Amino acid sequence: MLEVRGASMCGILGGVRKGGLIPTSSGPMTRRASILFKSGWISLVIIGLAILAFGLIATVVPASSDPPYLRAIGVASIGMGLFGILITLIAYRRRERWAWFALWYYPVFWIAHLVGGLPPGKEHVHQVVFIVLSLAGLLLPVREFFPRRGTRASTTP
């Protein structure tokens, strides 16, 4: 059985085929693939929620000598957290490749913070945890976004 889904992007990001459609398997996913995929998107949502929570706290209760600056960081973090959550819950769960590429922002962001010794906080345990979670969220279900050659069905009748 073959389900056909509309695609708005082309090339490597959207995987557009003839007629603007990309095939996806509507057959039952293997239990292992299902668990890996669910673990992946849950890991990414956790990161988005943590960033959102930090943003809300920094905006409402700025604990710094420069409250307007911390509030600005808080508002930006709220946006980043919401953006990541929405991309994960909508496009990533639909297995849209552009979402997989876009969410690589998380490990890059947290690695830059770790290597650069950037805030928040003086301890960097949370950064290591978020690096591991984001890499797990992107790499565990990689076959959902990039199936092996020959496993994707053709859209031509």
Image: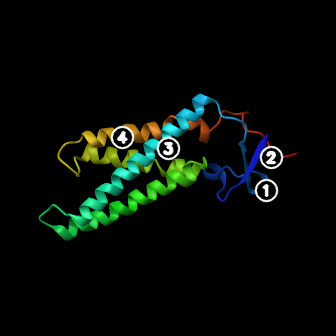
- Horizontal side, residue 130 vs residue 71: left or right: right
Marks 3/4: CA–CA distance: 14 Å
Q: Amino acid at mark 1?
A: Gly
Front label number (3 vs 2)? 3
Q: How far across and how far down the image is residue 14, in percent?
A: 64, 52
Identify the image quadrant of residue 80: bottom left
Q: Residue at x 49, y 39 (%)?
A: 40
Say the numbered circle drawn on residue 19: 1
Which callout, 4 or 1, points at the residue further toward the start of the chain? 1
Q: How far across and how far down the image is residue 69, in percent?
A: 21, 67
Helix, strand or loop under label 3: helix
Q: Amino acid at mark 4?
A: Ile
Residue on which the image places disc 3:
41
Q: Amino acid at mark 2?
A: Thr
Badge 2 vs badge 4, beta-carbon distance below 8 Å: no
Q: Amino acid at mark 3?
A: Trp
Q: How far across and how far down the image is residue 46, in percent?
A: 40, 46
Residue on which the image places disc 2:
155
Say the numbered circle drawn on residue 131: 4
Q: Residue at x 66, y 52 (%)?
A: 11
Front label number (3 vs 1)? 3
Quadrant in which the N terminus appears: top right
Helix, strand or loop under label 1: helix
Neighbourhood count class around disc 4 (C-alpha, 10 Å): few under 14, some 14–19, many 20 upward:
many
Quadrant in which the C terminus appears: top right
Badge 3 vs badge 4, beta-carbon distance below 8 Å: no
User: Total label count?
Assistant: 4
Badge 2 vs badge 1, beta-carbon distance below 8 Å: yes
Which residue occupies the extreme left position in the image?
65
Marks 2/4: CA–CA distance: 37 Å
